[in-house]
Image (spheres, rainbow, N blue to C red):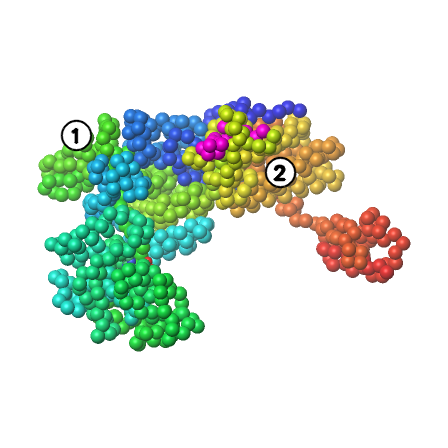
Amino acid sequence: ATRYDPQAAESRWRAEWDAANLFKAKSPAEAGDAPKAYILEMFPYPSGRLHMGHVRNYAMGDVVARHRRAKGYNVLHPMGWDAFGMPAENAAMQRGVHPGKWTYQNIDAMRAQLKKLGLSLDWSREFATCDPDYYGAQQGLFLKMLEKGLVYRKASKVNWDPVDNTVLANEQVVDGRGWRSGAIVEQRELTQWFFRITQYAEDLLEEVQKLERWPEKVRTMQANWIGRSEGLQMRFEFAGNAPANYEKGVEIFTTRPDTLFGASFIALSPDHPLVLQLAEGNNALTAFRAECAAVGTSEEAIEKAPKLGFDTGLTVQHPFEADRTLPVWVANFVLMGYGTGAIFGCPAHDQRDIEFARKYGLSVTPVVLPPNADAATFDVEDDAYTGPGTIFHSGFLDGQSIDDAKRMAIAKIESMGLGEGKVNYRLRDWGVSRQRYWGCPIPVIYCETCGIVPVPAADLPIRLPDDVTFDVPGNPLERHPTWKHTTCPNCNGKARRETDTLDTFVDSSWYYARFASPDDLEERAYWLPVDQYVGGVEHAVLHLLYARFFARAMRDVGELDLPSGEPFAGLFTQGMVTHETYKSDSGVWLEPSEVEQRDGTWIEIATGAPASVGPIEKMSKSKKNTVDPDAIIGAFGADIARWFVLSDSPPERDVEWTQSGAEGAARFAQRIWSVFDALPENGSSAIGSDDGSVALHKTSHKAVASIDKAISDFRFNSAVATIYEWVTALKKAETGSDVLVGARMEGASMLARCLTLFMPHLAETCWERIGGEGFVSAAVWPEPEPALLVDDSVTMAVQVNGKRRGEITVAKDLAKEAVEAAAFADPEVAAFLNGKDVKKTIVVPGRIVNIVVA
Ligand code: ANZ
Ligand code: ZN
């Protein structure tokens, strides 16, 4: 018996696959009648090193790609790099290395690591989003979208660090302070570029429901993010003198018009135009606005902040009650970006409103009576009641259900000419301006006479300058001595370039189309949509939403022939790779390689002191519980790394990496090899007619069918389990008679073709050993014979007086008398019946034989 040498085999096969160009996608013309399959995993950020999460993600995609290829599909399985972003600028600041150099070096290192995994990728389509070809094409898309009105400019808030004099990304704000300066971050208004994603809000919501091959969870997250709500937009007229420009009143948006009788105040956002107007010359209000601004820009920060209010002294008229007026407040929890930036507060039925009302002593009137509550005594203290019920204390709405009351209130307001029913979305337009260097330059020019001028298409790409410095905070493009100075393409006058770059989410919003073809619309139409997209659930909201938006925008500017606008027909979100965590005696995290188990207790190797084992958590640098794919590949080979991450758990769940598990997988690989190693060089695969051969023949065909089904259903771990059982059957047959060789040969040949999805290098060596033709990576899927998949025998329990005493296996359609005879002939049953008086025998076909004795 020989041993399989993974290191030698893996490098050999990869070289041979490369030389044969095995995984290159065919052009539509070359593909002929073959159906296409576009298999894509979320492309990596080139951080410098691959982690086990990547291995799992790409191993899963590779199983699908190899499976489809074996089944005759023309497969596109590309790889590239999501290469712009802040870490490259941080490296530049900390280590003085240019972001481009840092990025391309990382790409080289990670490409080498990825290649070692033996993934069936078409590397000919590789690109990085920081390649000028790629971002130049992206600038072209931006300009087409600008022309179509899908891009516009407006003022919007940014985090401003007053010490470093720079804009900060949200992740650079730590507890309200700049990450480097420690200064309290302010909000500043800057004019920025926006993508009009809200134009597709309804379509994005409607279509996501139809994506049957997406996880339900992700569809719900998308829907919640879009956040459709039906409500009423109406105006409240001022009771006294109206402020200038507000003679008609102030517009609010509500989703609860049924609670109008419970209104106790009006609240305006601190950024509402009326508030800005009132703040002029009003120091107290100006100070209040500044106080609100210190909270930060994120919705989350605003949600958590204590409620702050300012009474304007103005009052408005209640629409239904002539003798009631409501005070107008400014409140920090009302956002300018949503609805109209103004609300009516109904404290009894809204938690934010009750907190506000209790703090400022405003009235609280319940108008929804919970089921079974008593109208005379029901009241609200500190918790708003947001549940179901019947309307009361509400004039013409009394006794109505919430839904009916909503309809009636809207109709009434409409008839009074004060407003109308309206649908609102939580979804905001997508602000894409970033005040950073390492991103795609926004291709516009500001001319002193002509204003905003798009860069002419012929001048693209607008390249990033290489000679930049990172010694001071701020955007290097802004302070570059020459880059931003240019002449106007219109009037030749003095002009300057936009120095902001695009949010890196833009780069990953259309890369799937670029992989399909750099510019050929027919080829893009051929490949898209992606048939199977695989990636992390952390991208379930933003990345997928932006990509869905971009596919629509590209379609509408004539860059993509994709009527549905849906780029990903199938989506799978894989679980994480976890690992135990370890801590030293003094409580610092230790790496797995820094500890070992001695006589059942954990020891820190360096000190010999006891170490403790913590919970199993997602691999992360901060907890030091990562294992390096390269180390695993070095120790066991890439096949083992792939096999392990696919084998132990369902793909959507987390999988825990353990050393012993990896060792077990390595032993199993040798066992598989021994199946092939024990076969004759050129044995025939003619199946013997003996029972053993027939049974093994069946086992193999059934195994293939079940693996096939498991892979189609994304149950890779069940496919792995089937391979384990199958190998056991093949090993057992080795100890049997020589007539089994034919069935063993056939089984081995089929096994190699299934195995190639998981352990492609080992499968190749096994295939070669049994004289398989060509590469097993290019072999067709072993189609099982349908006749072998049906069970023509059944196993039946034999009971005596209701107790199980044995079992028999008989032909499915065997006559009742023959089944009885088989039951009596079973040695265990016969031994038990010995001498007893049989009264009756009952046969339940296919299940049980019950013998009744005296
Ligand atoms: C009166 C009311 C009574 C409300 C009640 C709720 C409960 P969704 O479902 O997210 O659309 N609102 C409207 N615009 C707002 C803004 N710019 N900033 C903060 N809050 C705003 O939420 C709509 C509800 O959120 C609206 O309905 C409004 O409060 C508030 F018992 O109006 B409601
Ligand atoms: Zn000009």
Q: Which residue is painted at 68% across and 49% down in the image?
A: 791
Instruction: Assign the C terminus to one quadrant of the image.
Output: bottom right
- The part of the chain drawn in magenta is 583-598
Checking the image for residue 482, the label placed there is: 1
Q: Which residue is painted at 83% across and 47% down in the image?
A: 827
Question: Which residue is denoted by mark 2 in the rendering?
Answer: 724
From this viewpoint, is residue 252 visible?
no
- Whether 8 is drawn above or below 310: the answer is above
Q: Secondary structure at mark 1?
A: loop
| Residue neighbourhood size for the residue with mark 2, other residues' Cα within 10 Å, grouped as few (<14), some (14–19), many (≥20) | some
Q: Position of residue 617 (x, y in %)?
A: 48, 40
Which of the two residues, 494 or 569, is positioned nearer the viewer here? 494
Q: Which residue is painted at 49% across and 45% down in the image?
A: 652
Report if the beta carbon of the residue with label 2 is closer than 8 angstroms to ligand 1. no
Instruction: Assign the N terminus to one quadrant of the image.
Output: top right
Image quadrant assignment for residue 620? top left
Q: Earlier in the sequence, mark 2 or mark 1?
A: 1
| Badge 2 amino acid | Tyr
Q: Position of residue 77 (x, y in %)?
A: 44, 37
| Badge 1 amino acid | Thr
- Whether 577 is drawn above or below 566: the answer is above
Image quadrant assignment for residue 671? top right
Q: Position of residue 663 (x, y in %)?
A: 58, 31
Relative to 807, 231 lies left or right: left
- Residue 438 falls inside the magenta stretch: no
Image quadrant assignment for residue 166? top left
From this viewpoint, is residue 272 visible?
yes
Q: Position of residue 315 (x, y in %)?
A: 19, 66
Q: Residue furthest right?
A: 835
- Whether 334 is drawn above or below 407: the answer is above
Q: Which residue is painted at 22% across and 61% down in the image?
A: 329
| Residue neighbourhood size for the residue with mark 1, other residues' Cα within 10 Å, grouped as few (<14), some (14–19), many (≥20) | few
